[in-house]
Amino acid sequence: MIENYDIKTIIACGFYIICVIIGVVYLYKKRRYIKEGTLNKSHEEIYNNNK
C-alpha cells in the first residue's frame, strides 16, 4: 500500500507543478499582450509584427 501511495503522490505532485507552470506562463503572456495592446490581435499578426 505504501509503494502505491508514493507513486500516486509523485504523479499528483508532478501534475500540480505542470498545471502551475502552465498557469504562470498563460498569465505572463496575457499580461504582456495587454501591456502591448495586442490582446485582440491574432497570433499571426503578433508573429508578423515581431519579425
Image (spheres, grey):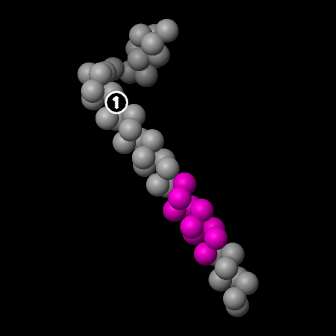
The residue shown at (57%, 69%) is 12
Q: Is residue 15 magenta?
A: yes
Nearest the eye: 28 or 47: 28
Report x, y in % for residue 48.
46, 10
Quadrant including the N terminus: bottom right
Indicate the secondary structure of the residue bearing disc 1. helix
Q: Residues within 10 Å of mark 1 (few under 14, many from 20)?
A: few
> From what the image shows, is residue 44 above or below residue 11?
above
Q: State the count of labels.
A: 1
Q: Which residues are magenta?
A: 9-18
Q: Main secondary structure of the magenta part?
A: helix
The image quadrant of residue 18 is bottom right
In this figure, which residue is indicated by the disc labeled 1? Answer: 32
Q: Is residue 36 magenta?
A: no
Tell me if residue 50 can be seen.
Answer: yes
Report x, y in % for residue 44.
45, 17
